Amino acid sequence: MSLYVDIKKKLGGFVLETKFQADAGVTGILGASGCGKSVTLRCIAGILKPDEGRIELDGTVFFDSREKINLKPQQRRVGFLFQNYALFPNMTVRQNLMAGLKPYEKDKKKAARAIEAMIDKFCLDGLESHKPQQLSGGQQQRVALARIFLSKPRALLLDEPFSALDDFMKWKLELELASLLEEFSGNTLFVSHSREEIYRVCDRVCVMDQGKSSPVIPVKQLFEAPGSRAAAVLSGCKNFSKARLAGENRIYAEDWGVALEYEGEIPDGFYCIGVRSHSIQPVLQKEAPGRKNTFRCKILRVVEDVFSTVVLLRPEDGVDNGRIRIEMPKESWQTFCRQEGAKDEIWVHVDGKDIMALHG
């Protein structure tokens, strides 16, 4: 099954222009708050009407502005899991499930059997008479998912499904959801602003930035070769410098004041480089001379995290705001400091394969 989306929607001063194709499996939509992720899902579900464009799922046209097609949400058979789960507060668990099944199953005996099967599948035994306010966040989510699956959806739209949960419950439900999605044969769009969730749950990802979408790519590609600075930021990269070519396989990082050997292709529109914090390593002074891609930095600040040490640096020949952040296990930083001694400056090294050439 394939989901095709090419739409435009204006909401006040915000303009959504998103275009992507998602095949069966789990496709993540990654972006910062306010970038248009949830608006995109609402347009696909039929809750919002795009101003123009086309939405099609496996040959069924949901929306086409030229052909004046705009199917009702019930006709689209799309399961939408809202951030707040959207359970009916005055209904019990069983009644909420019945509300999800009623439009599609008129036979009361068949409906009852289907509901019992979902109660068992989603571990809701004993909660059938509870109302939403009597349930934990995890239990509410399971009820909402059970209600969605009762409608036998052709596609699932999951709008930040873990945003209302604490870290422990989030991890537990993520594992449960991953198992459910493996059994689902249709398309799933998983919206999140968390790169960790996208990496663990999704097969592919579409990055959204200020209302505009990028092509769908494999999740691992986002972290290994994100292409654009916006995608690199969302993937967790924290070190950037304006850059230009400085010869064959060489790039000059203008903000850092260093020329670096680079491995890989230069994308069209290249204007900067990115290097992940864990890819920049401190080097003992005695080992630095003559080593490629090694340069001296002034230590600005050392920050102790729970399990790691973050060191903020400014390259010796860099501009004032050309700062670098490195991160490493506490033990590794402590070992380096014992060997190097107390100093205000250190040498650092970055491998050419860890430099990401980026476009705008």
Image: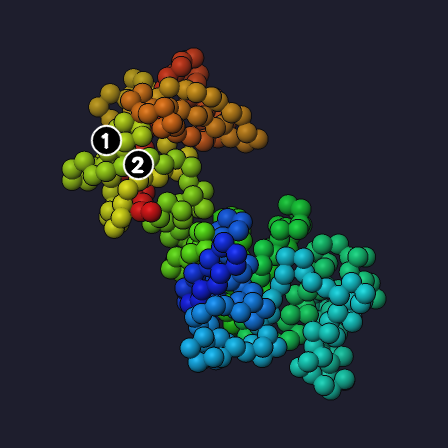
Amino acid type, label 2: Lys
Q: Work out whether 218 lies above or below 4.
A: above
Q: Is residue 160 above or below residue 185?
A: above
Q: Position of residue 159 (x, y in %)?
A: 58, 59
Q: Residue 35, how many percent across, how many down?
A: 49, 52
Name the residue rendered at 57%, 31% in the picture. 306
Give the distance between the C-alpha atoms of the residues marked 1 and 2, in whole angstroms.
12 Å
Asked whether 99 or 167 is in front, the reply is 99
Q: Residue 320, image x and y in percent?
A: 36, 23
Q: How is the image coloured?
A: rainbow
Of mark 1 and mark 2, the one earlier in the sequence is 2
Q: Residue at x 81, y 62 (%)?
A: 131
- Report the disc number at residue 259: 1
The answer to whether residue 200 is visible is no
Camera-nearest residue between 74 and 326: 74
Q: Quadrant of residue 80?
A: bottom right
Q: Which residue is mark 2?
A: 242
Q: Residue at x 28, y 42 (%)?
A: 271
Count of numbered circles in the view? 2
Q: Is residue 354 left or right of residue 71?
A: left
Label 1 neighbour load within 10 Å: few <14, some 14-19, many 20+: many
Residue 266 seen from this side: yes
What is the x, y in percent for residue 17?
43, 61
Residue that appears at 51% across and 30% down: 308
